């Protein structure tokens, strides 16, 4: 199944806007279209605020796309009542760079529980030990874990003033700066936020903070492909993405979707490669043995299939979990096999980053689509 944004717009031409004779496209009601593989997400503004009107538009849009494009498309419609319709499409700021930050690396996973945050923390430590200036943005809004992994649970960001504006100072440990929603919420309470609230929190941690000079900002994304991922790529120019997976098929299927998201034409963030976590188990009493509990070379084979680099593998070792739980990432342990494993993965990531920066122009932020299907540049 293959379809384009223009196919979706053509289908929406057949849907009449509420309160007028024009189509949703003609009336500038279509504010955003994002395509993820077999899923399409559409944001629509209408002038009628009633629940009945919103539901009718949602049903009409889904029917039109299924009838005109493909019955198997997973359609998600976000309908917002906007009594004063603006002819100018919603857009984001032209300059969304963060002064002083050279490279922004998004670390993602299609599936939860694969050790993405652990990998992020240890790559950050490995980079810092190589002499780089590193920051970590914990964008896993609903499950922030960086404060625990860096032993700063009881810390709070301080305030400073920059050019007359109040800014947050990131918390720092092991030479790494970090911000996380975990610094601002009660760890005993669930974070129950709508997407707009989470988006606002992420943007505050990006733009209302004094990060200073950084060679790398690592962004620990939540699992899957959702609002937070779109917020990040619409807010800042991400230099590249790294996908973390475990070897079993169910994790690899989700990881493949994660890669596909970043490779979408509308997003177009270079994927630096894949890391396989929990690759194998080696008992302490049998150091030469490897037991592939979840399967062998799953992420490596997937990387080859989808033409993405394989950055390396991290074994299942109890001390990795223990080190994260006590807030001292295992990459800090000099001369150990685990320190070497994370160092090798980090070096491979840097190699791909150098190639990316030499061969490709800087990543542009994702633009909100206007009614003609073109970006708002």
Image: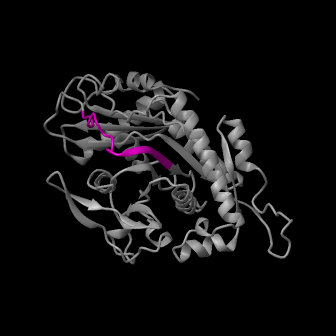
Q: Quadrant of the C terminus?
A: top left
Q: Is residue 130 left or right of residue 10?
A: right
Magenta segment range? 90-106
Query: What percent of the width, then of the height, locates residue 332?
Result: 58, 67
All told, the count of numbered labels is 0
User: Residue at (75%, 60%) from the top-left corner?
Assistant: 294
Tell me the chief SS of the magenta region. Answer: loop
Q: Foreground: 121 or 233?
A: 121
- Does the image show residue 191? no
* Residue 136 position by quadrant: bottom left
Q: Is residue 143 magenta?
A: no
Query: In this rendering, is residue 308 above or below 70?
Result: below
Q: Is residue 83 left or right of residue 51?
A: left
* Residue 201 position by quadrant: bottom left
Query: In this rendering, is residue 174 above or below 377?
Result: below
Query: What percent of the width, then of the height, locates residue 104?
Result: 44, 45
Query: What percent of the width, then of the height, locates residue 94?
Result: 27, 33
């Amino acid at each position: 199944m293959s379809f384009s944004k223009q196919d979706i717009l053509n289908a929406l031409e057949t849907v009449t806007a509420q309160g007028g004779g024009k189509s949703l496209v003609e009336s500038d009601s279509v504010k955003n279209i994002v395509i993820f593989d077999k899923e399409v997400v559409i944001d629509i503004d209408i002038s009628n605020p009633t629940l009945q009107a919103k539901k009718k538009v949602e049903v009409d849009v889904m029917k039109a796309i299924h009838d005109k494009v493909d019955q198997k498309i997973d359609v998600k419609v976000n309908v917002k009542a906007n009594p004063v319709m603006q002819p100018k499409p919603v857009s984001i700021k032209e300059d969304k760079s963060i002064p002083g930050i050279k490279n922004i690396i998004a670390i993602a996973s299609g599936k939860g529980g694969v050790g993405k945050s652990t990998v992020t923390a240890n790559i950050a430590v490995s980079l810092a030990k190589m002499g780089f200036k590193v920051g970590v943005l914990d964008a896993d809004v609903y499950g922030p874990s960086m404060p625990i992994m860096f032993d700063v649970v009881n810390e709070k960001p301080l305030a400073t003033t920059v050019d007359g504006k109040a800014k947050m100072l990131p918390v720092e440990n092991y030479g790494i700066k970090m911000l996380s929603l975990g610094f601002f919420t009660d760890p005993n309470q669930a974070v129950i936020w709508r997407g707009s609230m989470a988006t606002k929190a992420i943007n505050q941690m990006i733009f209302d903070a004094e990060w200073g000079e950084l060679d790398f900002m690592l962004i620990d994304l939540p699992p899957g492909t959702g609002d937070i991922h779109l917020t990040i790529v619409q807010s800042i120019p991400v230099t590249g993405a790294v996908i973390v997976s475990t070897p079993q098929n169910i994790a690899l299927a989700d990881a493949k979707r994660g890669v596909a998201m970043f490779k979408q034409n509308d997003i177009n963030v270079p994927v630096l490669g894949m890391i396989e976590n929990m690759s194998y188990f080696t008992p302490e009493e049998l150091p030469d043995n490897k037991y592939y509990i979840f399967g062998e070379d799953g992420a490596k084979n997937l990387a080859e299939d989808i033409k993405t680099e394989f950055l390396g593998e991290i074994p299942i070792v109890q001390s990795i979990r223990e080190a994260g739980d006590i807030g001292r990432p295992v990459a800090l342990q000099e001369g150990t096999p685990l320190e070497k494993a994370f160092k090798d993965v980090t070096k491979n990531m840097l190699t791909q980053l150098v190639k990316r920066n030499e061969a490709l122009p800087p990543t542009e932020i994702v633009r909100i689509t206007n009614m003609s299907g073109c970006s708002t540049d």
